[in-house]
Image: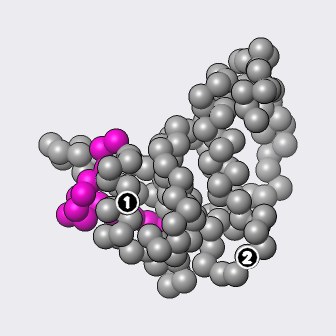
């Protein structure tokens, strides 16, 4: 995790107001909420959100947003990423994080964003990727569900 870049600061109160009715377990106040930016990734700022849900238990979520700049309409399409994750998670056995909400209202935190489930797993920080491991993993998961109904996924 890294300190948030000043261009990526988020309005915690606005985020909480937006997310608390839409995301299970999300708090209404910031007393049990922390946010830190992941120190890797390609271009869309991504954050780990930790939320106290009572009894000292913390739940984790991930927020992914567009960067704060003028962008081509098709660039940094977090909306498309949200739709793909939602379709794969709802209609296939492909292991993807659950997605909770997509916000296109830029008045909330300055850009479009979505919130998804946090999952433990491998994060490839080297853009060259360990090819064999990656392809092996992809093949392993593709065979989970060969009976995809592509019309549903569109």
Residue 45 in view in this figure = no
Rendered position, 148 above or below 26: above
Rendered position, 82 above or below 149: below
Q: Is residue 49 left or right of residue 98?
A: left
CA separation in Å, label 1 and label 2: 24 Å
Tag count in the figure?
Answer: 2
- Mark 2 is surrounded, within 10 Å at the Cα level, by few (under 14), some (14 to 19) or many (20 or more) other residues, namely few
Q: Position of residue 83 (x, y in %)?
A: 65, 44
Q: Residue at x 63, y 73 (%)?
A: 67
Rendered position, 21 above or below 145: below
Relative depth, front residue between 125 and 99: 99
Relative depth, front residue between 83 and 133: 83
- The answer to which image quadrant residue 38 occupies is bottom right
Asked if the residue under mark 2 is in contact with the one under mark 1, i.e. CB atoms within 8 Å, the reply is no
- Mark 1 is surrounded, within 10 Å at the Cα level, by few (under 14), some (14 to 19) or many (20 or more) other residues, namely some
Residue 69 in view in this figure = yes
Q: Is residue 25 magenta?
A: yes
Mark 2, residue position: 71
Mark linked to residue 18: 1
* The magenta segment: 24-39
Element type where label 1 sits in the image: helix
The answer to which of marks 1 and 2 sits earlier in the sequence is 1
Rendered position, 28 above or below 88: below
Relative depth, front residue between 78 and 44: 78
Q: Position of residue 61 (x, y in %)?
A: 43, 50
Name, please, the residue furthest toward the left.
55
Element type where label 2 sits in the image: loop
Q: Residue at x 24, y 57 (%)?
A: 28
Mark linked to residue 142: none
């Amino acid at each position: 995790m890294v300190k948030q870049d000043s261009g990526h600061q988020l309005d915690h109160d606005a985020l909480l107001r937006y997310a608390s009715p839409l995301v299970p377990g999300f708090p209404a106040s910031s007393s049990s909420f922390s946010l830190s930016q992941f120190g890797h990734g390609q271009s869309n700022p991504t954050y780990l959100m930790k939320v106290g849900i009572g009894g000292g238990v913390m739940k984790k979520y991930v927020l992914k947003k567009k960067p704060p700049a003028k962008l081509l309409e098709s660039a940094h399409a977090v909306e498309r990423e949200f739709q793909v994750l939602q379709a794969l998670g709802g209609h296939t056995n492909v292991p993807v994080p659950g997605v909770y909400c997509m916000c296109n209202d830029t008045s909330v935190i300055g850009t479009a964003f979505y919130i998804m489930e946090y999952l433990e797993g491998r994060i490839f920080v080297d853009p060259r990727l360990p090819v064999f491991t990656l392809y092996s993993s992809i093949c392993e998961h593709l065979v989970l569900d060969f009976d995809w109904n592509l019309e549903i996924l569109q």
